[in-house]
Image (cartoon, rainbow, N blue to C red):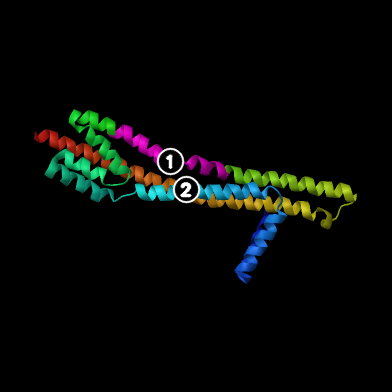
Amino acid sequence: MHLLALGFVYEIIAQAQTSSGGALTYLQQKFVEGGGFMWPILICLVLGLGFVIERIWTLSKSSTNTKKFVVKVRDAINNGGVKEAIELCQNTRGAVASVFHAGLLRSDEGIDAAEKAIMSYGGIEMGFLERGLVWISLFISMAPMLGFTGTVQGMIVAFDDIASANQMSPSIVANGISIAMLTTLFGLVVAMILQFFYNYLIAKIDRIVGDMEEASVELVDTLYEIQNKK
């Protein structure tokens, strides 16, 4: 089964090297030959990529140069007080700015209150960053499962063709085996594409969360320094 799948991949690559238009026509032909389960697999790919694009766009807005921003907040606190730092956070986009804003709003109630606000809003911001990933994970699981279901369907078609012809020959079972291999191949390819983007998003979220935690510690330290000077 795996050798046949690799054979299909090699054939697709060979067609792509001949001409882009020919490759597209070839893929369309194989998609039709794959049967009804090819459409749910395609839907998994389209919806999964839709969530991927939305997450990449959202995370790009949530990212910021944390070190420079921490310096700006510290300078704002030293020059204009907490009020000026709050205005800076309001005018800056990103997860770190949102967490800082929540902490600074509670700074007049004490360091402990500010630290609790930072931790609470950090959890909320983390949930916001991870929103939609569960759907990408679902499509990663569903695509190969649909492919394997199509494989079972293809084998059923092959055995039905054998029963109808009352004999066994490669030409009789070719259609059913083709359905089985194509659905498996496309399901696995879709899962691999979405898995790549899923891991990329997880790594990006981990980096943002790490920067957010590090910056939060620096903010709390800055507030402690201000409190000790009073």
Q: Is residue 38 left or right of residue 157?
A: left
- Looking at this view, name the residue that lies furthest to the right: 166
Q: CA distance from mark 2 to mark 1?
A: 12 Å
Would you call the spot at circle 1 few (<14 residues within 10 Å), some (14-19), or many (20 or more)? some
The quarter of the rendered structure image containing the C terminus is top left
Residue 50 on image: x %, y %? 51, 49
Q: Which residue is mark 2?
A: 199
**What's the amino acid at mark 1?**
Glu
**What's the residue at 11%, 34% (across, down)?**
228
Q: Which residues are magenta?
A: 118-140
Residue 217 on image: x %, y %? 25, 39
Q: Is residue 93 above or below residue 122?
A: below
Residue 128 on image: x %, y %? 40, 39
**What's the residue at 55%, 47% (across, down)?**
47
Mark 1 element type:
helix
Q: Quadrant of residue 152?
A: top right
**What's the amino acid at mark 2?**
Asn
Q: Main secondary structure of the magenta part?
A: helix
**What's the residue at 85%, 55% (across, down)?**
169
Mark 2 element type:
helix
Mark 2 or 1 closer to N-term? 1
Q: Which residue is mark 1?
A: 130
**What's the residue at 52%, 41% (across, down)?**
135
Task: Confirm whether the magenta stretch covers residue 69.
Answer: no
